[in-house]
Image (cartoon, helix red, strand yellow):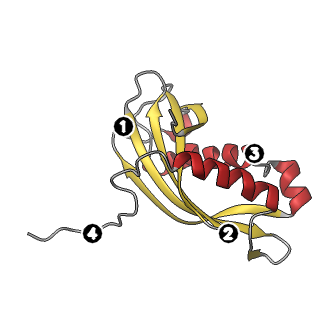
Amino acid sequence: MTTPLHLYDAIVVKEWVDYNGHMNDAAYAIPFSRAIDAMMAMVGLDEAGRVSTNHTIFTLAIQMRYHHEVKEGEPLKVSGQIIEIDAKRIRLYQWLRHGTDDTLLATCEQLLASVDQSGPKIAAFPESVGEKLRAMATEHAELPVPEDAGQGISLRRR
């Protein structure tokens, strides 16, 4: 059975904790960002790949939802699912969970773009990178789309 891709593990460090004694809202972005770095390495856009292809990935849009607090020293794990892909962009959905009890801590949906750094300009993924991403996306297409994927923020009027 296909499952979301495991991307990253971490421990909540002191610098990520706020005056309330739990991870600061801004710090949640760090493991999600590191997970994208890990995915980039999986498809050939690690440091050497970025140098050889002159391509990288930039975030165009991000939507995070906070579900549960987590404290210093606690383990984290991030998994991700490619929801959509085209020649130049990826829509990636990620889950941040507690590393031992699997509690959902936060979700993050991002629109990512392939960037040719010689411009810089948004450009098609290098061929080998695009092939790997499309293979992942094909596998992830078997998974259900998360219920809150694609939703924005609004105040509901009654």
Viewer-nearest residue: 4 or 104: 4
Sequence-earlier tag: 3 or 1 = 3
> Helix, strand or loop at disc 1?
loop
Could you tell whether 74 is left or right of 90 in the image?
A: left
Q: CA distance from mark 4 to mark 2?
A: 29 Å
Residue beneath label 4, please?
154
Instruction: Judge by depth and name the residue closer to the eye, 111 or 29.
Output: 111
**Quick check: marks 2 and 3 in contact, CB under 8 Å?**
no
Q: How many marks?
A: 4
Q: In the visual, does 98 lie left or right of 29?
A: left
Mark 4: give few (<14), some (14-19) or many (20+) Cα within 10 Å: few
Q: Amino acid at mark 1?
A: Glu
Of the two numbered discs 2 and 3 on the same chain, state the one appearing first in sequence: 3
Callout 2 touching callout 1 (CB < 8 Å): no
The kind of residue tagged 2 is Lys
Please give the residue where the numbered disc 1 appears in the rendered image: 69
Q: Pointer 3: residues within 10 angstroms few (<14), some, or many (20+)?
A: some
**Residue 86, image quadrant:** bottom right
Residue placed under numbered mark 2 in the picture: 88
Q: Which mark is residue 41?
A: 3
Secondary element at tag 3: helix
